[in-house]
Image (tube, rainbow, N blue to C red):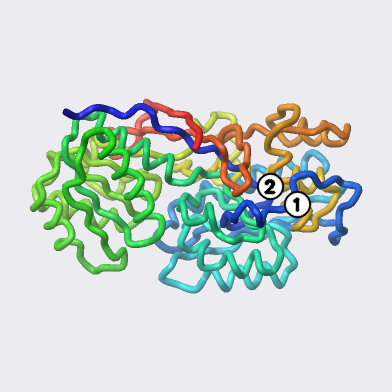
C-alpha cells in the first residue's frame, strides 16, 4: 500500500554574509562564533564583494535573478551608510558551468582584486571545483544556490556558507510529493554530477520510505548529443511518474519523452530545471506537471526593486537567497568592525541567530551600532546558520505548470528543519 510520508524535515535557510561561493566544513574547522569587534583584525576598510554566478552555461537562466538579488542588496546597504562608513563595492563575474574553466578564471580575477567575500557559484559542482582556491586564499564564499550534501562536510576552513538548504530537504519533499500523488513506481532521469546524484538519492529514500518504488534511475551525461537511449530505459520500465533531475538540457529531454509516448505519465521537475518554458515548448506541453524549488515566496516589494535593476526578469530562482547572502555578509562585517574575511566568517553565524530579530539591513545595522546581538531573518527564511554553514531550516515550494508552460501562482510551501 502506498502511504505518504509526512514526516520530512526541512533544512534551514543559510544566508551567508558575504557574497561568496559555497562549501561547508567540518565543525572542528569552523571559527569560533564568539568573536568580538574589539579583537577584529584590520582589513583595508572597504568591504569588497564579488560574484561568480552563471552568465553562460547550463544554468545561465539562474544568473539574472541571482545577480539582481545581489544588486538589490548592495543598493540597500549603500543607501543606508554602507559598511564601516564606506560604500560596499561589487564586482560581477561569470561562473560558467563544469564544461568550461570560466569559474577558475573568475575566481583568480577576484582574488587578485583583493575581494573579501565571493558569492556563488550556483552549481554545486562548480563550487566544488573552486572552493579550495577561494577558502585557501582565506576568502569567504557564500552560495545562494548550492544544494549538494557533499558541501556540508567539506573541509572549508570555516569559510564556506550557503543560504540554500542541502538536498536532504528538497529530496524529502520531492519524494513525498511523488508518493502523495499516488504514484506506485517512479523513473528518474538524473544529471551525472554531485547535485543530480545526491538529490536523486534523497528523493529515492523518501519514495521508498513512503511505500513507493523507484523502478529505474538513469544517470545521463548533460553534454550528450541525444537522450533517446536514456529515455528508452525509462519507457521500458513503464513507471507511473518521471522525475527529471537536471539543468538546461531538460529542453532536449522533454521532446524525447514526448516522442516515446510518455506524455501521459506524471512529470516532476526540480530547482535545476524548474523555469519558464513558454518559448520552448508548444502550449499545453507541461500543463499539470509539478516541480520543487527551495525558497519562500518572493514578495511583490522585492520583485519591484529587482525589476528596477533588470526589467527583463521572468524567473525568481534563488533571487532572495542571493539578496540574503549579501545582506548577511555586510552585517557580519559591520558586527566584526572589519572587512577581514576571517572576521566576517566568525560573525556570519552570530548575526543569523540568537539575538534580537530584524529583517532588513538598516534595522539590523542600527541594532549592531547599539552593541546589540542580532538575529537576521531574511526574505528566504530565518537563516539560522549551523556549524557547517548550512541553514538550520528552510522552505521548499511545490509548483505547478499551466497551459502556457509557465508556473502558476498557486504554490504550496513546506517549512522544515534538517
Question: Looking at the image, is 412 positioned above or below residue 209?
Answer: above
Q: Are marks 2 and 1 in contact (CB under 8 Å)?
A: yes
Q: Which residue is mark 1?
A: 344
Name which residue lies at 63% across and 51% down.
27
Q: Quadrant of residue 219?
A: bottom left
Name which residue lies at 23% across and 29% down.
181
| Residue found farthest to the right | 38
Residue 171, horizontal then vertical, whole percent: 37, 42
The reply, left or right, for residue 38 in relation to residue 137 is: right
The reply, left or right, for residue 281 in relation to residue 237 is: right
Question: Looking at the image, is 353 positioned above or below residue 319?
Answer: above
Observer-nearest of 313 and 149 = 149
Observer-nearest of 216 and 261 = 216
Question: Looking at the image, is 169 positioned above or below residue 300?
Answer: below
Residue 84, horizontal then vertical, whole percent: 86, 48
Residue 29, horizontal then vertical, whole percent: 66, 57
- Give the secondary structure at mark 1: helix
Residue 214, horizontal then vertical, whole percent: 21, 45
> Can the viewer see residue 404?
no
Q: Which residue is mark 2?
A: 17
Quadrant placement of the N terminus: top left
| Residue found farthest to the front | 28
Amino acid at each position: 500500500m502506498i502511504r505518504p510520508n509526512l514526516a520530512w524535515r526541512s533544512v534551514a535557510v543559510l544566508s551567508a554574509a558575504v557574497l561568496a561561493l559555497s562549501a561547508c566544513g567540518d565543525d572542528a574547522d569552523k571559527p569560533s562564533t564568539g568573536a568580538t569587534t574589539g579583537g577584529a583584525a584590520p582589513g583595508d576598510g572597504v568591504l569588497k564583494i564579488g560574484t561568480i554566478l552563471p552568465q553562460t552555461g547550463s544554468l545561465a537562466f539562474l544568473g539574472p535573478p541571482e545577480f539582481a538579488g545581489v544588486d538589490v542588496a548592495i543598493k540597500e546597504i549603500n543607501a543606508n551608510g554602507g559598511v564601516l562608513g564606506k560604500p560596499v563595492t561589487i564586482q560581477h563575474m561569470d561562473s560558467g558551468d563544469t564544461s568550461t574553466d570560466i569559474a577558475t578564471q573568475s575566481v583568480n580575477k577576484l582574488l587578485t582584486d583583493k575581494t573579501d567575500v565571493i558569492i556563488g557559484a550556483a552549481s554545486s559542482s562548480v563550487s566544488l571545483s573552486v572552493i579550495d582556491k577561494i577558502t585557501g586564499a582565506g576568502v569567504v564564499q557564500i552560495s545562494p544556490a548550492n544544494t549538494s550534501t557533499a558541501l556540508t562536510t567539506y573541509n572549508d576552513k570555516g569559510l564556506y556558507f550557503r543560504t540554500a538548504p542541502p538536498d536532504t530537504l528538497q529530496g524529502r519533499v520531492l519524494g513525498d510529493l511523488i508518493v502523495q500523488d499516488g504514484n506506485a513506481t517512479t523513473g528518474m532521469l538524473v544529471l551525472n554530477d554531485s547535485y543530480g546524484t545526491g538529490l536523486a538519492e534523497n528523493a529515492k529514500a523518501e519514495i521508498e520510505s513512503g511505500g513507493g518504488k523507484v523502478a529505474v534511475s538513469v544517470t545521463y551525461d548533460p553534454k550528450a548529443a541525444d537522450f533517446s537511449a536514456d529515455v528508452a530505459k525509462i519507457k521500458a520500465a513503464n513507471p507511473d511518474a518521471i522525475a527529471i533531475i537536471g539543468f538546461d538540457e531538460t529542453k532536449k529531454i522533454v521532446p524525447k519523452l514526448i516522442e516515446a509516448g510518455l506524455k501521459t505519465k506524471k512529470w516532476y521537475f526540480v530547482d535545476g530545471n524548474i523555469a519558464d518554458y513558454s518559448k520552448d515548448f508548444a502550449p499545453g506541453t507541461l500543463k499539470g506537471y509539478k516541480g520543487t524549488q527551495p525558497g519562500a515566496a518572493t514578495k511583490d516589494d522585492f520583485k519591484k526593486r529587482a525589476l528596477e535593476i533588470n526589467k527583463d526578469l521572468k524567473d525568481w530562482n534563488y533571487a532572495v537567497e542571493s539578496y540574503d547572502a549579501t545582506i548577511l555578509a555586510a552585517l557580519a562585517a559591520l558586527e566584526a568592525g572589519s572587512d577581514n574575511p576571517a572576521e566576517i566568517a566568525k560573525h556570519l553565524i552570530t548575526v543569523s541567530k540568537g539575538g534580537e530579530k530584524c529583517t532588513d539591513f538598516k534595522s539590523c545595522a542600527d541594532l549592531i551600532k547599539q552593541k546589540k546581538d542580532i538575529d537576521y531573518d531574511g526574505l528566504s527564511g530565518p537563516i539560522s546558520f549551523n556549524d557547517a554553514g548550512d541553514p538550520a531550516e528552510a522552505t521548499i515550494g511545490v509548483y505547478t505548470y499551466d497551459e502556457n508552460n509557465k508556473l502558476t501562482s498557486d504554490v504550496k510551501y513546506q517549512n522544515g528543519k534538517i
